[in-house]
Amino acid sequence: MTEETPSGGRRSLARMLGIGLVASVLGVGLGLAIDWFPVQASTQASTIDTLYDVLIAVSVPIFVLVSVVVLYCVWRFRARPGQELEDGAPIHGDTRLEVIWTALPAVLLIALCTYAFVALDDIEAAQPDERRIRVTAQQYAWSFEYPNPRGGEPIRAEELVLVEGETVRFDIRALDVIHSFWVPAFRMKRDAVPGITTQLRITPNRRGRYPVVCAELCGLGHAFMRATANVVSRQEFDAWMAQQTQGTQERGG
Amino acid sequence: MAMKLRAPGWYRATAFVGLGVLFALGLTSAVRAASGLDPVIAGEAWLLVGLIAVPLFFLVGIGCFDYWFRWAAGKPTVPEDHSSHGAHSWRDYFRVNTDHKVIGIQYVVTSFFFLFIGGAVAMIMRAELAQPGTQIVDGQTFNGLFSVHAALLIFLFIIPVFAGLANYVIPLMIGAPDMAFPRLNALSFWMLPVAGTMMVASFLVGPFASGWTAYAPLSTTQPIGQMFFTIGVQFAGASSIATALNFLVTIITMRAPGLSFFRLPLLVWANFSTSLLVVIATPFIAASQFFVLLDYGLGFNFFSASRNGDVLMYQHVFWFYSHPAVYIMMLPGFGIVSEILAVKARKPIFGYRMMAFSLLAIVVLGFTVWAHHMFVSGMQDWIRVPMMVTTAIIAVPTGIKIFSWLATLWRGVLHIDTPMLFALGFLTMFTLGGISGVALAMLPFVIHVSDSYFIVAHIHYVLFGGSLFTVYAGVYYWFPKMTGRMYDETLGKVHFWVTFIMFNVTFAPMHLVGIEGMPRRVSDYPEQFASWNLAISVASIFLGLSTLIFVYNMVSSWVGGPKATANPWRALTLEWQVSSPPPIFNFDAVPTVVGGPYEYGVPGAVHGVFPDPDKDGADAAKQQPATTPSVAQ
């Protein structure tokens, strides 16, 4: 290596490009192979997970590019014995290169934003026949209110019971400080803010029990402010609802 | 003794602190008595007023205001004997000093002191998080730990340590004898230990526990410990604003002859941009914390929903400062890295003008992205999309900088020593932080990961892998200039590698646990996250211990390191053209700048010329062979 003069010509560039390409492919492969997300339990989850895969595929080559250039320069252009007092090539800039690395990232970012905007529209789209559930957050518990099918007092539950395949619109409110309603398996989150009602739309599509988490620091019990979202079939839900309405009637009677 | 109590210093400061305590007691008791409140002596009211009054009494006592008071009282001015200029022994660092070089070192050492406290606090946190369940601290104390950790490291470390390095270097770099307002500079510094002591002292009454973000109405309904943050931030913020004004005036008015803006080293550009951000943005956090103080102390109900308060307004005002603040915590680092890469690669900075303009672009764009911290906050939906676009676009000027640094390395002659290692480490780690930042702009994704450990990972890649790496790079780089001694290169390299590896082992897995569903700011977590958290906690111990290598190197080298020459790095910028450490007023003769700061490899290039002391200073510059073939950039 020592015979070569550190000129950094076309061959150097090509060699570096080759290394970068291989490293990028490996990196993207690794990024996609990692099991990042919890189980997908809503239609929103698959949209978001796909977006993340795209982000991995775009990001990894950029990181690899920077790292490979740094490592290659360290290896190729480091001061060899005898070069202690030498200087590098007095290159002050290159307008064409600078235009490229300003314009190209801008185009890429606008493209990503457009994609993200479409995806956002997709996951937040209103659906016909949404069930409305009221979520109430207070230090340090969640409660859920369903409209009473027989009219009268709404049904209150400590557990969030949802129907598989049915879109739910949550009306979220807080009684004391800010909380945040998050179900990682659904990938969706919205703060519960005192004084206003916030909305969130989720379409669960996989039966099972998933944690409901408070994501906004709300005081000493924040870490323990958890509930369960139970996604069930329509029959199971109806049975549960019947049981609940009976409960309210007994209490009311 | 009476003399000592009259002269500025620690005796008088102690006496004045006592007076401040009595003043707070007297004021609260008098007001309570007059209002018919019972009891007349109320501990919390006394403490709250004391938190504001005692620091002011302290600042008067230590001597920050002596000159101005004298002037205001119409007393004959004391002829300036420069007795408060320069440090002749270590004791001078514990006095009110107006020398920017002394203040710079005071800043840096004080900031590092709070870095170590903040780091130790983080290690207690990681100990608690090593296993699920509650082992060491309860929920409220844990909330206090991460709140104090973040508040110290943001307001008492990253922001002031950059101000400290710049304080030392910038007057030297621009050929000035000092900062524009040396007394204001001293006052700026002394507000810092006040703010830091206040935040640490909150442990005496139960630390503030609503995060460094102090979201209302949680912060307005917390125990009294919260006020140690609310008021402490005011002192740190005032310090920050005063320093920024000082930098702006210094940079605009005190440049050496010939030092036009486009001949300024990029560190000066970076601090110019940062100071603009500070001056415009910092009043907003001051406002947000005054709102909290008034809500808490006097029942103003700005943020109580039941009294028509607006809870989201707090977040808007807070982030209107705190987003620009992330650039306040990064731009000076960009400046440091530009200096180091040019000198250590022996090459001009690639695309100097774009490097300067991209800083200004970040300043402007930095004010258009604040609500991306509020994507799931429940604010109006439509504003999220424009904020997503601006947040993504701000990566363009940052990208210009990264690519220009890479191009600066290309075909250089790279000297891979400790400052260079940290600069290169910054380049790669900050790129990762930037990439996760772009991911966090993408709305559907951020809905899932906001307030999760993914955010914790991102901010540590930006602030630790980004800012702290540049701070280390800068401290090693200017250590010879500041102390007149060389640091130990081997220890420096060991420090870098241990930090670099353990940093990644600590923070990289946090991306994963965040996406998997672990929220941030929790003292406990489900079993499924246990193994990653244990690994993170173990790595964080080594990351914490790595700072001991740094401390040992700094202290032992300062005491007994080999003497440094004036210009050990063969740099062109002006601070290296004077002795190490520099003379008391920096330049025995004012230099004239005749070329760009990074003309490495250009034959015969000169940045500044110094008049020959033997000849008449006025026309000496002309007699120097000012050969500058490619000055024009």
Image: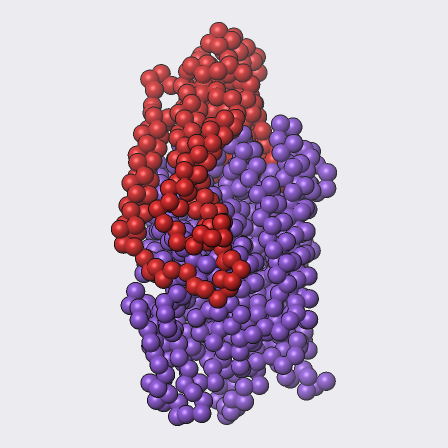
Image coordinates for residue B355, horizontal then vertical, percent: 35, 58
In terms of depth relative to the viewer, which is nearer, A61 or B235? A61
Query: Which hue is chain B drawn in?
Result: purple
Confirm whether residue B227 shows in the render. no
In terms of depth relative to the viewer, which is nearer, A178 or A110? A110
Color scheme of the displayed model: by chain
Confirm whether residue B516 shows in the render. yes
Image coordinates for residue B233, horizontal then vertical, percent: 53, 59
Q: Residue at x 41, y 41 (%)?
A: A15
Residue B591 drawn above or below residue B81 = above
Residue A234 drawn above or below residue B452 = above
| B613 displayed left or right of A108 | right
Quarter of the image for residue B555 reads bottom right
Q: Residue at x 39, y 76 (%)?
A: B608
Q: Quadrant of the C terminus of chain B?
A: bottom left
Residue A10 drawn above or below residue B113 = above
Image coordinates for residue A90, horizontal then vertical, percent: 36, 62
Q: Residue at x 66, y 67 (%)?
A: B557
Q: Residue at x 50, y 58 (%)?
A: A79
Q: Residue furthest front?
A: A3
Quarter of the image for residue B561 reads bottom right
Quarter of the image for residue B32 reads bottom right
Q: Quadrant of the N terminus of chain B?
A: bottom right
Query: Which hue is chain A drawn in?
Result: red
Image coordinates for residue A213, horizontal then vertical, percent: 55, 30
